């Protein structure tokens, strides 16, 4: 053991500088907390060890939410992408989502620069070995070289580094992602501190050299021509985009896999960790869906200044010689040079029901965990948690109010509530279907949902908030105007409707009601009744969505209203579930483990049924009355 | 949800002169207004609190009159639950009170959980602290019992059909979800509106079929009160034994409304018969002799179905003729038993007496004709609409209410699809339908959609 020395005192320490760590550090420091971010390797800040992309369905909306809360991911990807696309444009507004292909190296550089320029943030390269805990409270950390840092709060964002092990074929070695140093002592330390850990697994495909790909055998996938951005603050758009390419596995690929299955650590039993179903390896796909003659493979450039291409869809842990054969069997990749082999990685994660919805651990006060260590998968999921952990750790250190996002507020709220209430038995990925109120959690309205809270917490500037507030007022006014404006069945209106193939008016109609017709658009409506003020594209989109889908939105809001009432039924922290005779034994155990903050959260725990909730409500009420009585 | 408007029958089940359906919650008055029509045409919402109103309940869509009622309207907080409460006094009897309950459930109320009125009273501060334990016990006890009863009631066939509908919806949902979450996967067929419409319409039709059987379902739940009638020694006891042995008894030896009448339940081709006075038949073979003329008249009056047994090997007696006369206005089937003996009876005369009722000849001794008898019972009950025994019955008020809601949400989905609403919006109503159907069979785990997604499609990086 090296000699220990005092190295400094901070409000917040963030261990790790992946996508969770950087958001945590950025949010905490922007809230005014003196923050230290430690990473094993400074050159790996915001590294993307897997696919070079940010966003997509649900995830893209998380990035928008991060932006609304003043986060970093949105700004950096806007600056460093090589391609951007709006997905699901043919569907309803609730599921539209933006996805960007990232220039990985540039993304890291820009993120590093952003953090380096942050006033309250200190960045240092160090391996953390130990947490200092006294009386159930975190006091600081000790690094490998014996440096002791003290802090009011600590956030652990170690990703897949905790006891990480890389597996390729029958080769298995201790390592973080991309052959980084794994974090082993910290994993032991967390275990000693009493945390329940699980073993998860994920994987990545091989990378090939672009110069050796025969693109003529693939299909081009260009980005959108319309300029797009994740951040509400972005004003400059990248127009020079790089395409991705689509190819397929062949019958030969599947034969090679079937012939070599015995060499796959997945099937030999060498991998014990639970992998995500939504991210299966190619060997899994071929075995489980044996009737499918081919699988899609996307060739994604990893950046502008590299020839490395990510082969999305070919995640594998087969031995390298088999991986080479696999590539050769794919049209376009016959002569491709493999630059890095695919691999599987196993790592320790914390059972997330050990966390409060603020991401503070229940076991140790002022200690937070965020990102892949909490059993999630994906950069966006990590970033969203990092941001919330950063906000809450800073708030606690500075004596400010904590922030918990609800399921009706944000996808981030859905994500964290799922984790801390239900736990997860595989790496957790956000899907739009996990959100009950996805019509409310849209790409377009992340600012409306979250700006007030971001502003109150000091996460966004006055200038930005004012700009948002103006936009909100303009949208509200225009919607009101459309509701008050009556369009008469005059020649112009009828003509527009006729051209549209829409039925003509028999009587006057409110402009808002006309907009509700599926074939009608705001643009077209504007030719009949023009807004007195100039509106931006985003504002028009907002107006159109809010008016067109009013009925559905209204229905969802009613459900949310009921949910909120249940959220407001708080469960006292010192509740003794054992003392409540009526609650079923299984429900008691779950309640004691999760320790829900509200009756609404309790009702989402699997194994707690409505009768248990009824009894819980009565019990809480009884306690309230008893308290009132004793105060009299 | 804890804050919606609940409804339940709050008088004991059975034959009372009056029954009460109670509503409690913010929407209680509004829901009552949707179905209640006073002669004055005044809306309840405009009336003073704690007043009683006479009027009719009507189906909002068809305008059909459901019941003639007295309705008490009490606005909170001076009510049992401290919420707005509406009590609908309707005619007693299971059928009418159930129809009233169904009507309010269809129009926005939710069927109350066991003990929920009392729970609300407590939560709203109406009941004092000392009663809290009792409330919790009540919820637990009632829930456990209701659960056992519900599970017992759940017909395997209904459960299977609901599961089938849900699976169809789930596959549809998974396909829509996969299009949303993995928009670039070209090997997943795009869930088009026509495809969604096709599945949704099928599900709606199936729900409609289930609902059509539900009015019969209520009788099914109570059983068809059935009396086996006949002179001594014509084979009543054999008929009873034959029905009981042939068909699995649903419940045996359930105590009836009076102590001296014992009932047995049998299920004849899906028609549950509540065989009245089975003990009497077994012991003395003579209902009239055993319980007296007055009581037997009463029993006959309350019967839904009479099986009149006459002897094939004997001429019709005066007593036989008198029995025909007694039951002349009732539903009955004539069983001409003992065809194993030589024929003495005048079948033409029997048929003449029976009029358009069915006459079945049997030899219970040789087990002949029982099938025909059972078919006759089923045909009578279903009025010829029986589809070869392939019918799933819905008999629980909760199930029916949920089916109505499921029907209305899937209808919304179909209408939205026709109106050109995007598929992910339609999805909201389809998902709700799936959840509602899940509540019927006690399965609403959201995780199953995600499981379906990954088992049905091959996705990932």
Image (cartoon, grey):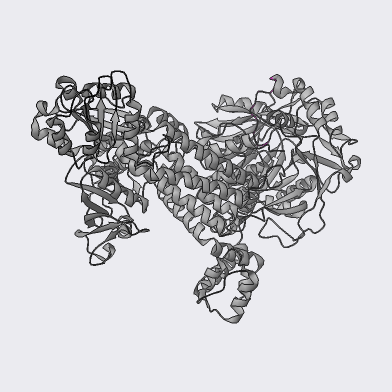
B184 above or below B29? above
Name the side, left or right, on which A362 lies relative to B112.
right
Depth check: A286 or A354 in front?
Answer: A286
Q: Provide the major secondary structure of the magenta segment.
A: loop
Q: Is residue B135 above or below residue A435?
A: above
Residue A438 in sight from this viewpoint: no
Residue A276 on the magenta segment: yes
Q: Which residues are magenta?
A: A269-279
Q: x%, y% of residue B144?
A: 33, 31
Q: Quadrant of residue A603?
A: top left
Task: Using residue B204 as the reference point, say whether residue A123 is left or right of it.
Answer: right
Q: Nearer the viewer, residue A174 or A562?
A: A562
Quadrant including the N terminus of chain A: top right
* Residue shown at the point (75%, 54%) measured from the top left: A79
Which residue corresponds to the image point at 16% horizontal and 26% vertical from the top-left?
A: B231
State the image coordinates of residue A241 (x, y, percent, origin top left): 81, 54
Q: Quadrant of residue B117?
A: top left
Residue closest to the eye, A43 or A430: A430
Image coordinates for residue B38, horizontal then vertical, percent: 24, 63
Q: Residue at x 23, y 38 (%)?
A: B352
Say if residue A516 shows up in the picture. Answer: yes
């Amino acid at each position: 053991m090296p000699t220990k020395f005092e190295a400094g005192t901070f409000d917040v320490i963030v261990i790790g500088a992946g996508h969770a760590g950087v958001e945590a550090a950025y949010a905490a420091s922007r809230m005014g907390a003196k923050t230290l971010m430690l990473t094993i390797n400074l050159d790996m800040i915001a590294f993307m060890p897997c696919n070079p992309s940010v966003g997509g369905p649900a995830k893209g909306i998380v990035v928008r939410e991060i932006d609304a809360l003043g986060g970093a991911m949105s700004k950096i990807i806007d600056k460093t992408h090589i391609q951007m696309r709006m997905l699901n444009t043919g569907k309803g507004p609730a599921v539209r989502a933006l996805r960007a292909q990232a220039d990985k190296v540039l993304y890291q550089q820009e993120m590093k620069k952003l953090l380096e320029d942050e006033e309250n943030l200190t960045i240092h390269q160090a391996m953390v070995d130990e947490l200092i805990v006294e009386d159930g409270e975190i006091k600081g950390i000790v690094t490998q070289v014996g440096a002791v840092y003290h802090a009011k709060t600590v956030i652990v964002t170690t990703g897949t580094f905790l006891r990480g092990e890389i597996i390729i074929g029958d080769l298995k070695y201790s390592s973080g992602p991309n052959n980084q140093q794994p974090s082993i002592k910290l994993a032991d330390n967390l275990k000693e501190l009493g945390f329940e850990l699980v073993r998860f697994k994920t994987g990545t495909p091989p990378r090939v050299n672009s110069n050796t790909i025969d693109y003529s055998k693939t299909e081009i996938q260009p980005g959108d021509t319309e300029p797009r951005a994740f951040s509400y603050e972005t004003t400059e758009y990248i127009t020079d985009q790089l395409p991705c390419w689509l190819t397929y596995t062949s019958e030969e690929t599947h034969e090679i896999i079937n012939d070599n299955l015995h060499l796959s650590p997945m099937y030999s039993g060498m991998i014990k960790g639970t992998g995500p179903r939504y991210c299966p390896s190619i060997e899994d796909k071929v075995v489980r869906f044996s009737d499918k003659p081919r699988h899609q493979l996307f060739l994604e450039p990893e950046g502008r200044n590299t020839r490395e291409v990510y082969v999305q869809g070919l995640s594998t842990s087969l031995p390298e010689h088999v991986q080479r054969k696999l590539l050769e069997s794919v049209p376009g990749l016959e002569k491709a040079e493999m630059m890095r082999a695919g691999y599987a990685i196993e790592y320790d994660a914390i059972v997330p029901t050990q966390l409060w919805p603020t991401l503070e651990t229940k076991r140790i006060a002022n200690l937070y965990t965020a990102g892949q260590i909490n059993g999630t998968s994906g950069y966006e999921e990590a970033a969203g948690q990092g941001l919330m952990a950063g906000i809450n750790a800073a708030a606690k250190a500075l004596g400010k109010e904590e922030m918990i996002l609800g399921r009706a507020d944000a996808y981030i709220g859905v994500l964290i509530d799922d984790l801390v209430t239900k736990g997860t038995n595989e790496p957790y990925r956000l899907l739009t279907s996990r959100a009950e109120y996805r019509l409310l959690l849209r790409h377009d309205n992340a600012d409306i949902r979250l700006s007030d809270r971001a502003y109150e917490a000091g996460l966004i500037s006055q200038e930005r908030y004012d700009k948002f507030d103006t936009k909100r007022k303009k949208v509200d006014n225009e919607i009101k105007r459309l509701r008050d404006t009556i369009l008469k069945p005059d020649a112009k209106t009828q003509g527009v409707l006729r051209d549209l193939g829409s039925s003509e008016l028999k009587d006057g109609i409110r402009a808002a009601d006309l907009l509700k017709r599926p074939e009608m658009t705001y643009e077209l409506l504007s030719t009949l009744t023009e807004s007195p003020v100039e509106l931006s594209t985003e504002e028009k989109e907002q107006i159109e969505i809010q008016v067109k889908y009013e009925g559905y939105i209204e229905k969802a809001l009613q459900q949310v209203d009921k949910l909120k009432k249940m959220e407001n039924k708080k469960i006292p922290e010192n509740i003794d579930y054992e003392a409540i005779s009526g609650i079923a034994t299984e429900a008691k155990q779950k309640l004691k483990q999760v320790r829900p903050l509200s009756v609404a959260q309790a009702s989402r725990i699997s194994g707690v049924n409505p009768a248990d909730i009824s009894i819980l409500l009565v019990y809480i009420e009884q306690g309230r009355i008893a308290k009132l009585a004793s105060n009299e | 949800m804890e804050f919606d408007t609940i409804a339940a029958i709050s008088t004991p089940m059975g034959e009372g002169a009056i029954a009460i359906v109670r509503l409690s919650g913010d929407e209680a008055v509004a829901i009552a207004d949707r179905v209640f029509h006073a002669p004055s045409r005044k809306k309840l919402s405009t009336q003073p609190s704690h007043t009683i109103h006479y009027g009719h309940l009507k189906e909002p869509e068809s305008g059909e009159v459901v019941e003639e009622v007295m309705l008490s309207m009490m606005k909170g907080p001076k009510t049992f639950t401290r919420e707005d409460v509406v009590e609908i006094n309707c005619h007693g009897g299971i059928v009418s009170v159930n129809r009233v309950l169904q009507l309010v459930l269809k129009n926005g109320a939710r069927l109350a959980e066991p003990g929920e009125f009392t729970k609300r009273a407590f939560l709203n501060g109406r009941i004092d602290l000392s009663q809290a334990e009792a409330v919790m016990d009540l919820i637990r006890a009632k829930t456990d019992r209701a659960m056992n009863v519900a599970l017992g009631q759940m017909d395997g066939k209904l459960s299977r059909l609901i599961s089938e509908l849900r699976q169809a919806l789930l596959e549809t949902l998974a396909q829509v979800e996969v299009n949303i979450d993995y928009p670039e996967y070209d090997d997943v067929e795009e869930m088009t509106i026509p495809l969604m419409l096709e599945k949704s319409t099928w599900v709606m039709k199936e729900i409609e079929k289930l609902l059509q059987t539900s009015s019969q379902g209520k009788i099914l739940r109570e059983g068809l009160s059935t009396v086996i009638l006949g002179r001594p020694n014509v084979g009543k006891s054999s008929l009873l034994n034959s029905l009981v042995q042939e068909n699995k008894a649903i419940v045996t030896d359930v105590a009836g409304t009076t102590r001296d009448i014992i009932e047995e339940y049998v299920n004849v081709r899906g028609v549950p018969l509540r065989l009245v006075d089975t003990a009497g038949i077994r012991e003395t073979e003579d209902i009239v002799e055993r319980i007296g003329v007055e009581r037997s008249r009463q029993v006959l009056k309350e019967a839904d179905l009479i099986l009149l047994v006459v002897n094939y090997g004997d001429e019709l007696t005066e007593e036989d003729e008198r029995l025909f006369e007694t039951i002349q206005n009732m539903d009955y089937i004539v069983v001409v038993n003992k065809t194993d003996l030589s024929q003495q009876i005048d079948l033409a005369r029997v048929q003449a007496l029976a009029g358009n009722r069915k006459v079945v000849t049997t030899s219970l001794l040789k087990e002949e004709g029982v099938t025909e008898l059972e078919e006759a019972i089923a045909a009578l009950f279903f009025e010829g609409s029986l589809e070869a025994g392939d019918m799933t019955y819905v008999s629980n008020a909760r199930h029916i209410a949920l089916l109505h809601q499921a029907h209305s949400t899937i209808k919304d989905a179909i209408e939205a699809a026709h109106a050109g609403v995007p598929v992910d919006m339609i999805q909201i109503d389809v998902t709700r339908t799936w959840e509602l159907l899940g509540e019927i069979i006690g399965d609403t785990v959201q995780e199953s959609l995600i499981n379906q997604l990954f088992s049905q499609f091959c996705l990932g990086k």
